[in-house]
Image: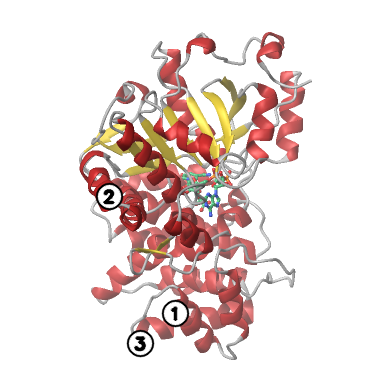
Amino acid sequence: MRLSTATLDRLPAAVARPTYDRSRVKRGVVHLGIGAFHRAHQAAVFEQALAAGDLRWGITGVSLRSAGVRDQLAPQDGLYTLVVRDGEGERLQVVGAVMAMLVAPEDPAAVVAALASADTHIVTLTITEKGYKLDRATGRLQAGDADVAHDLASLDAPRTAPGFLVAGLAARHAAGTGPLTILSCDNLPHNGTLLRDAVLAMAAAHDADLRDWIAATVTFPQTMVDRIVPATTPADIAALANTLGVEDHAMVKAEPFTQWVIEDRFAGERPDLAAFGVQLTDAVAPWEDAKLRLLNGAHSAIAYLGGLAGLDFVHEVVAQPAARAFVEALWDESATTLDPPAALDIAHYRAALMARFANPALQHRTRQIAMDGSQKLPQRLLAPIAERRAKRQSVDALALAVAAWMRWQSGVTDAGEMFAIDDPIADRLGAAVSGATTSTERVDALLGLLAFRPDPDLRSVLVANLDRLERRGAVAALASFGETA
Ligand code: NAI
Ligand code: CS2
């Protein structure tokens, strides 16, 4: 038996559930890319608005690519369980905010209609770093991408997120529908600006007036989003079924910590976000830099070094004293590149982060974080490296982390286990590795793909680190890092 409206009253009393009348909820939010993170983060905030009696904030969830999440949620009337877990215990909440699900390739017109609806005031996106279809070095739409080319030629049945947004905005413009706020919730620096650039470039290719109208009336606030939400596993679903007494195929699991910082620049209506824990501010960048460089930078380092060492989970990596000391050294380096907000105490933040990584109940896979490294490294590790090198400062820990990403591209762990590289430019990464005969050539070829040019000193540090990883492995590299640091 599945979780659904009909089975809600069978759940144990301790499980929180919607107390508002779902039949009266309007759909004020369209979310593009309804993966695990949205369900555990933004949807939990809109759920609070609904629970407080503001029934404008139901969500239309859109999958841009596959039907998987719709197929999980539809038989459950959009209901799913948010499982919040740490070493101390577990809190269960059935969330009712997702009122409708669309699968874009099945019915692109329905997605455009949802974006154009007068009820829709906010669009949120979690489409991963690669979903923006921007060449980050030039800031232009990826000319060689077939879906981008399709949407640049016609928006009759869009394929990309920028394409859908422009088609929806064109319909709003034509009908004189009210203003719209579009919130990128991906881990990208200046995510609002990047999304705005992509949307304006797509619009300009179709209609200069539309482009100007979007530029003048639609807002794309910057956001910083934070909550560790590992991919759900079949074992998670089976364990939850034991507790609930019904099966929930759409559950998500998350840590207790959650943070959403949004630039206070809404074009139209919004819920009382501050009342639900969202921080509204004029300056998101200092929050974003701290999060991307400390949390995500360490995450990527843990993923590649831990993954090479054969460790499956983040908490297993930080349980190793050498790895923990290395993460602290990485933070010592990255922290000097930050200009933290007054409300952020870096020492406290670091201690809290380490405790979050150590959460044994999350089972966050190093391989999940290792995905899409080409899209993640620039903001997490390369930006702080460039800034420290510009001041002639050492980058020993950051360089070992980047070298671990390079070693990972060989597709083999230190124990000889082969794996596939999961990255939108996996082909080019693989060719860069196999086409090079020395570690120096590999460093040059791989960094070239990220449009990053190291100075000569940095280049030799990277080569030495990659050499060490190739010859002796991640465990030895971490141990010797501790000896020399
Ligand atoms: P997920 O794998 O559950 O969902 C990913 C979503 O992105 C899916 O809807 C998928 O269809 C869509 N997507 C993937 N590639 C795409 C492409 N090329 N074009 C358009 N859409 C595409 O992953 P999850 O956990 O929901 O994370 C998604 C993003 O959310 C992350 O990449 C990150 O930027 C952000 N995020 C995730 C956190 C987490 O801990 N899971 C925390 C903070 C931010
Ligand atoms: C992780 C993030 O998968 C990754 O790359 O570093 O998704 C991380 O879990 C979140 O940013 C935490 O907010």
Which mark is nearer the camera, 1 or 3? 1
Q: Nearer the viewer, mark 3 or mark 2?
A: 2
Q: Amino acid at mark 1?
A: Gly
Determine the residue positioned at 23% across, 39% down.
217
Residue 338 horizontal side relative to residue 423, left or right: left
Whole-number angstrom distance, CA of label 2 to CA of label 1: 34 Å
- Reply above or below: 473 against 258: below
The first of marks 3 and 2 along the sequence is 2
Q: Is residue 333 above or below residue 431?
A: above
Does residue 260 appear to the left or right of 405 in the view shown?
Answer: left
| Quadrant occupied by the C terminus | bottom left
Which residue is at a point 66% across and 58% down the rendered structure image?
A: 311
The answer to which of 456 and 437 lies nearer the viewer is 437
Q: Report whether the residue tagged 1 is closer than 8 Å to ligand 2.
A: no
269 versus 226 height, above or below = above
Q: Which mark is residue 211?
A: 2
Q: Element at badge 1?
A: helix
Residue visible at 70% across and 11% down? 6
Q: Is residue 440 visible?
A: yes
What residue is pinned by disc 3?
456
Identify which amino acid the numbered label 2 is placed on. Answer: Arg
Any mark on residue 448, and which?
Answer: 1
Split into 4 quadrants, where in the image is the N terminus?
top right
Whichever of callouts 1 and 3 sits on the residue coming sooner in the sequence is: 1
Give x and y (percent) for residue 14.
Answer: 62, 13
